[in-house]
Image (tube, grey):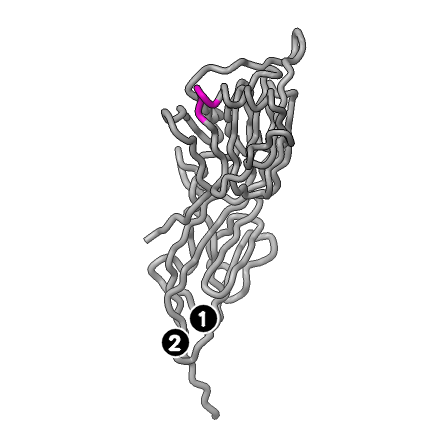
Amino acid sequence: MVTVGPTTAYASDGGPTPTASCSADPSGLGCGVEGTTSTPTASSGGGGTTSCTWKGGTNSNPGVGTWLTDAEWQQVTIWLSGNLVYHVGTSPWDWMGVMFCPDPTVSAVVIVGVLPGGPPTPGNILGYLALSQVPWNPPSVGTSPPAGAPSVVNLPTYLYLNPGTGANPGAWQTFTTTAAVGGVSATIVATPVKVVWTTDGGSVTCPGQGVPYNSAWGNSLAPAGSGACTYTYSDTSADQPGGTYSLSATVWYHATWTSTGAGDAAGDLGVVPGPTVTEQITVKQIASVITAG
C-alpha cells in the first residue's frame, strides 16, 4: 500500500470556490486562480506601468496604524465586503498581505499562514501564491531489491524514483505554474534538486532521482557517476533481526518566480518540498555460521 503524506494546504475562505485550472510542464498551460469579482488589470510597457503595491504585516488588529493607514484599511473593508480572501500556507494564519492595484485601490487581500520557506514578506507573497498552485506529481518509489522481495541487513538497498510515462511524467521534473490574483500574475518555476529518503531510524539525501541496481556491478558498490542512491539497513536488535520499515521519499525543488503587472517583481523562494510518499519495505537478516578447519 502506498500512502501519500500531508502536504501544504491552500484554500479560499467563504463564498464560492475560485476557479482553477492547472497543468505541469511541458504543456506550459499553467494555473489561473480568480476571485468572485473582476479586478483592475495592471499593465506594463507601451504607455508605461500601472503602479501596484504590496503591503503586508501582522494579521492582528490587522495592522491599522502600523503597516496600514486608516484610509487603506477602509479600502480593505470595502474589498472584503464583495470578494474572497485568498489563503496561502497552513494555520496559524498570522500574516496579511494587501495588493493595491492600481494604487490606491485594493485588488486583493491574502491571509498567510506557515510557509515552507519561512516568514512571508510583501516581496515574496506573489511567488508563494504561484507556488501554492503547483500541481505536484507525488513521487513513485522504486527499490532494488524490488517490492515483494526483502532487502538484506548490511547490504545496500538501491533507492530511485520511477520516471513515469505519458501524461504523468513523474515527480523528477520542472514544474511551471502561473497564478493570477488582484490584477497581476506570478509564474513559478520549480526545478528538482534532491530527494530526501527517510526510514525508521535513518535517512539519506541524494542529488538525483537514483537508478535501479545494475547486475553488472556484481557485489561491488555502484561506480561513481552512476547516479545510484543507496541506504544500508543494520541489525539493531538481536531479538528482531530485520523486519518491516517505512520508507518515505520527498523531492525538493528550487523555486524561483517572476511576475507581470506588479512592476516586474521577482524572487527566489529557495528549496521547497513537494509531496511525500511512504511505502513499506521488508528487511531480513541472513544468518551465517563460521567454522574452523
Q: x, y (%) of residue 48?
A: 67, 10
Q: Residue at x 46, y 15 (%)?
A: 38
User: Is 110 situated above or below 286?
Assistant: above
Viewer-proximal residue among 64 and 250:
64
Mark 1: which secondary structure?
loop
* Magenta segment includes 83: yes
Quadrant of res 149: bottom left
Q: x, y (%) of residue 87?
A: 47, 33
Tell me the kind of residue under disc 2.
Gln
Horizontal side of residue 205 vs 36, given as left or right: right
Tag 2 residue: 240
Rounded to the nearest whole Å, what is the CA distance between mark 2 and mark 1?
A: 12 Å
Tell me the kind of residue under disc 1.
Val
Contact between marks 2 and 1 (CB within 8 A): the answer is no
Viewer-proximal residue among 7 and 251:
7
Which residue is the extreme one toward the top?
A: 47
Residue 166 in view of the camera: no
Foreground mark, 2 or 1, reads 2
Q: x, y (%) of residue 209?
A: 51, 48
Q: x, y (%) of residue 31?
A: 46, 26
Q: Which circle marks residue 153 in the picture?
A: 1
**Earlier-in-chain disc, 2 versus 1:** 1
Q: Residue at x 50, y 62 (%)?
A: 231
Q: Which circle marks residue 244 in the picture?
A: none
Residue 273 in view of the camera: yes
Q: Residue at x 47, y 42 (%)?
A: 91
User: Is 1 situated above or below 253?
Assistant: below
Q: Which residues make up the magenta segment?
A: 80-84
